[in-house]
Image (cartoon, rainbow, N blue to C red):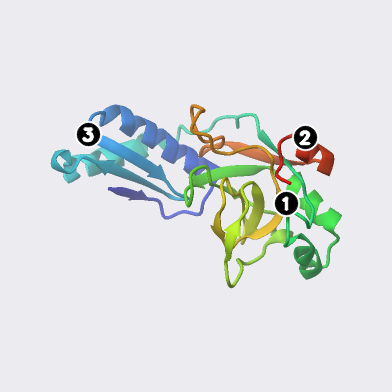
Amino acid sequence: MRLVFEADPAPELTRTLLAIQKSAQRHFQGTLTDSVIGYATLTLFFKPLQFQRDRVEAWLLDQVDLTKSDTHCDPPPAIILPVFYHPSVGPDLEWLADDKGLSVDDIIALHSGATYFAYATGFAPGFCYLGTLPSQLMAPRLATPRSKVPPGSVAIADLQTAVYPCESPGGWRLIGQCPQPLFNLRHTPANLLSVGDTVRFEPVSEADFYAMGGAR
């Protein structure tokens, strides 16, 4: 069952989805097997033999009315992610600067100067879609994705930014690398970032990057 809002992505909308998700987990305990938040959607997964569509649809409509006027809250403290911005770990950094007519320092200042909101997770464990990227940095995905993107790669695509938590294929533009793991099964929760989090990137030196565990 999918709840879809015909609205542009916004933190307030995500907080509404989070509130409905939390209520669903309580209300349908035992029959709900999973739930996933997207930019403007909430998908609920039920045990097939215990799924009652009419009942769930009516409950969701009630929840939308209950939560849409009660989701304002102060943002949580930002999670700070250290980033080493350099062509050696961000092969698209100089290309982006040339394409935008900016210096590399300008690119770094714009990317690290913004505060981002975690709208959704997916693609890979620990991968979190963050927005909104400053419009001056907007860039399309690669026409041909890379077959391997190193873990920790800080990337941008369109008006989004993210950190690749593990080695994987990827078509986003790479501008740096974060030495802090975003996914670890030995931790609870395993994901460092969750939907609804606030995130900032902090430039670090090469020496600090390696001291923090950055891969050589």
Residue at 67% across, 50% down: 154
Quarter of the image where one finds residue 26: top left
Picture disc at residue 194: none
The residue carrying mark 3 is 31
Marks 2 and 3, how far apart at CA: 47 Å
Amino acid at circle 1 = Gly
Q: Are marks 2 and 3 in contact (CB under 8 Å)?
A: no
SS state under label 1: strand
Q: Which residue is at the front of the view, 172 or 67? A: 172
SS state under label 2: helix
Rendered location of residue 48, percent (x, y): 17, 44
Rendered location of residue 4, percent (x, y): 37, 51
Residue at 71% across, 36% down: 213
Residue found at the far left of this picture: 49
Q: Which of marks 3 and 1 is nearer the N terminus?
A: 3
Q: Can residue 7 be seen in this view?
A: yes
Residue at 27% across, 29% down: 27
